Image: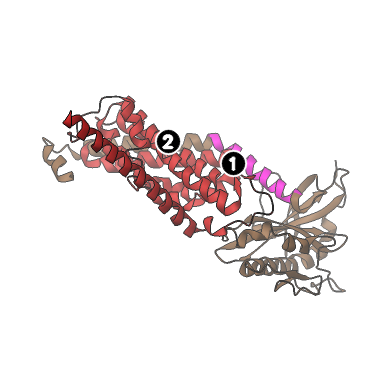
Chain colours: A brown, B red
Amino acid sequence: MSEETFNNQPSMPSSKALILTLGMIAMMSGLLVVLTYQLTKPIIEKNKQEALQKAITSVLPDAAVSKSYQLDENGLTLLEEGQTANDEKNAVYAGYDAAGNLSGLAMVSSARGYQDIVKVLYGYNLNTRGVIGITVLQSTETPGLGDKISSDPGFLANFEGDGLDVGLNEDGSQVINKIHTVKNGQKENPWQIDGISGATVTSTAVGAGLGESTSRMLPLLNKFKDALPAQLQQ
Amino acid sequence: MVKDPRLPDPLSWQTFSVGLWKENPVFVMLLGLCPVLAVTNTAMNALAMGLATTFVLVCSGVIVSLLRKVIPKQVRIASYIIIIATFVTITDYAIQAISLDLYKALGAFIQLIVVNCVILGRAEGYASKNPLANAFINALGMGVGFTFALLCLGVVREVLGSGSLFGIDLFGSSFQPWAVFVLPPGGFFVLAFWLFVFAVFRKRQQRIKTAQQEVADAA
């Protein structure tokens, strides 16, 4: 077909014309893309903030306001609005209730699931020293099987009440019992997650991620807890 | 039906309806099957994907038609790809701005609209040879046809696979969803089913037409 069209051309246009046309089209295209980017950027940022805020409220039911911190070996630092932690894994979101009291912390854990990384935001209750809720931030797990981690009532029951026990040892240098997932129906201890049959890999990944994150972050948090205000300053 | 494809089409109802039925991109031309199979696990995803594709189809059709006398034949494909990619990027940002949840659900398939053969096919096969109004209406028809096809799959898969429609629960908690329908194999099953239905329809129509022809000839 293309041969036929080429034969119909009376003469080959100069390469200058070709380059000029492509250049013009590319320039117009660039202009349009940049324009859209500029127009939508603030809205997308706002959406992302709202999504994060919603996720924080879902794992810390009492939280009305949240402050972002970055926690690593160098200490706990408050992040200004618009700033993000150097690594998502080091971000700590402190939730304050309507009266301005610290109600809990939300942190991000991630581990490899069946398809890809499963990223989970979990809530940590400072009083009961337990993981009291999770919400899935990123997952491409099989719909109908792996995505049960956000809907299966038996699985979510793991985080009810006092939550998963992540108490620290006496000097606060490590978590006594690391969180892990056991087979469905074999949960015996408060630091074990009752897995989902049919979503074994994904529920194990959630357990592994939580175990890794809590055993790394909580001792650090204990070390730098003085930097975390218990009351929100107005 | 045989006519020189280089001649512009006269503008008629046909210009629009051809995409709905006779040349439906999915059920007749079997083009763009990748999003058809991948993002039709819920009716909402199917609708969003259909609308996004329609937007790109219409915008690129309009621009290609406007520039059809400016673009030299030798660089036409490259130009079409740039034009299509521009609108895909715009759609990508727009969907992120409208709803992040939707953006997550559609995943990489928004960006992949750029390689959807329906769009390049329309640009090369129709918009580049026809005036603005024709290109616009034809692209709109194709887009509606594509959306319709996606919805056909999405509705069946969501109802059977999740027991809901557009996120609204239909059967209550006693319904055991048929999970295979939201999984990839379900996409193939439902697509095959619809192709079968449409093939039967077309066969029947053809038979009626020949019968009528015979009657007319006899008379």
- What residue is at 18 percent from the left and 36 percent from the top? B2
Horizontal and vertical percent position of residue A12: 14, 38
Q: Quadrant of the N terminus of chain B?
A: top left
**Residue labelled with disc 2:** B144
Q: Is residue A42 magenta?
A: yes
Above or below residue A92? Residue B63 is above
| Badge 1 vs badge 2, beta-carbon distance below 8 Å | no
Highlighted range, magenta: A39-57
In three-dimensional space, the C-alpha distance between marks 1 and 2, rounded to whole angstroms, equals 22 Å
User: Residue B99 shows which numbered tag?
Assistant: 1
- What residue is at 51 percent from the left and 47 percent from the top? B154
Judge if badges 1 and 2 mark residues of a common chain: yes
Name the side, left or right, on which A60 lies relative to B51. Answer: right
- What residue is at 71 percent from the left and 46 percent from the top? A54
Crowdedness near tag 1: few (<14), some (14–19) or many (≥20) residues, C-alpha within 10 Å:
some
Name the side, left or right, on which A131 lies relative to B172. Answer: right
Q: Amino acid at mark 2?
A: Val
Which residue is at the front of the view, B98 or A77?
B98
The quadrant holding residue A233 is top right
Say what secondary structure mark 2 lies in. Answer: helix
Q: Quadrant of the C terminus of chain B?
A: top left
Horizontal and vertical percent position of residue A215: 75, 69
Q: Is residue A2 magenta?
A: no
Q: Chain of mark 2?
A: B
